[in-house]
Amino acid sequence: MSFIDIRDISKSYGEVPVIKRLAMTVDEHDVVCLIGPSGSGKSTLLRCINGLELIDDGEILVHGDRITGPGVDVDALRRDIGIVFQGYNLFPHMSVLENVTLAPIRVLKQKKDEAEERAMTLLKRIGLAHKAKEYPDRLSGGQQQRVAIVRALAMDPMVLLLDEITSALDPELVSEVLNIVRDLASEGMTMLLATHEMGFAREVSSKVCFLCDGAVYEEGPPEQIFGDPTRDRTRAFLKSIREAKRI
């Protein structure tokens, strides 16, 4: 049984279909990179998995348990499936430490000292323990994004969803964020990433899914998708990426 089983889901905004009978499986410890043109449904798919968007049809299962449809405990779902966006979404009136400990204290009911100890361990790991008392506006974009990832990890999620987490960063800040993802991948964290960083996707992923018109158009191991794609639109997309020198 797959760790995540996405079964023919559909999602529309009004009359506009964004995801069309999309099917996909993710095994535990997989790193699945979602690639494709803007508007292909990558971000919407991640939001559906996390319960931020309700699907119109189909179902999503995690460990065999349905996480979509009536009766689902959305709060419990979001404890287990963390998501990090391209916008850091840190609370500007809270320090780094307060941002990271808020959910563990409020949602997981951890004691403050326990949550702070865990937060400091995570911040030390990414080299930002010395910024614990700072406010987000005193941090660089790369530092803020690293804090956003730590905030998600502080909930000890089973799955981490990463939505174009480097697209808002200056080029020189991208590597410091991607290094964290590399470390998480090497430790076996199950992740789904929507990304335009094709070289990174080729390096870190166990599977690549090319999305087009709201569905998985082609999927396979990174060496096959990037080295020998079998379908026309995948080849055309990667050709345009190469011509733009983004791979």
Image (spheres, rainbow, N blue to C red):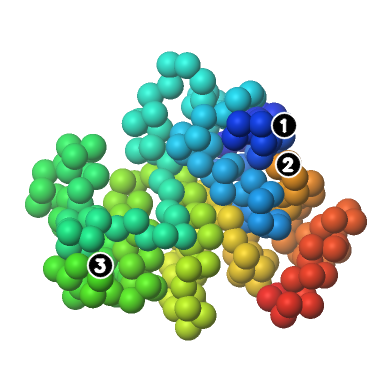
> Which quadrant: the N terminus?
top right
Q: Is residue 214 above or below residue 121?
A: above
Q: Which amino acid does label 2 sit on?
A: Ala
Q: How far apart are marks 3 and 2 (CA)?
A: 37 Å
Q: What residue type is labelled 3?
A: Pro
**Residue under pointer 2:** 215
Look at the numbered discs 1 and 2 and tell me whether their residues touch, using CB distance below 8 Å: yes
**Residue under pointer 3:** 136
Between discs 1 and 2, the one toward the N terminus:
1
Q: Quadrant of residue 89?
A: bottom left
In this rendering, does residue 210 appear at all? yes
Residue 133 horizontal/vertical position (percent): 14, 68
Kindly identify the residue that appears in the image at 79 percent across and 63 percent down.
Answer: 237
Residue 205 horizontal/vertical position (percent): 62, 59
Q: Callout 3: few (<14), some (14-19), or many (20+) C-alpha neighbours within 10 Å?
A: many
Q: In this view, does 48 lie above or below 121?
A: above
> Which quadrant: the C terminus?
bottom right
Give the left or right position of residue 20, taking residue 153 as reference: right
Q: Callout 2: few (<14), some (14-19), or many (20+) C-alpha neighbours within 10 Å?
A: many
Residue 151 horizontal/vertical position (percent): 31, 55
Q: Quadrant of residue 238?
A: bottom right
Kindly identify the residue that appears in the image at 53 percent across and 37 percent down.
Answer: 48
Kindly identify the residue that appears in the image at 38 percent across and 65 percent down.
Answer: 145
Q: In this view, does 206 lie above or below 145?
A: above
Look at the numbered discs 1 and 3 and tell me whether their residues touch, using CB distance below 8 Å: no
The local secondary structure at tag 1 comes to strand
Viewer-nearest residue: 212 or 189? 212
Q: Which amino acid does label 1 sit on?
A: Arg
Marks counted in the figure total 3
The local secondary structure at tag 3 comes to helix
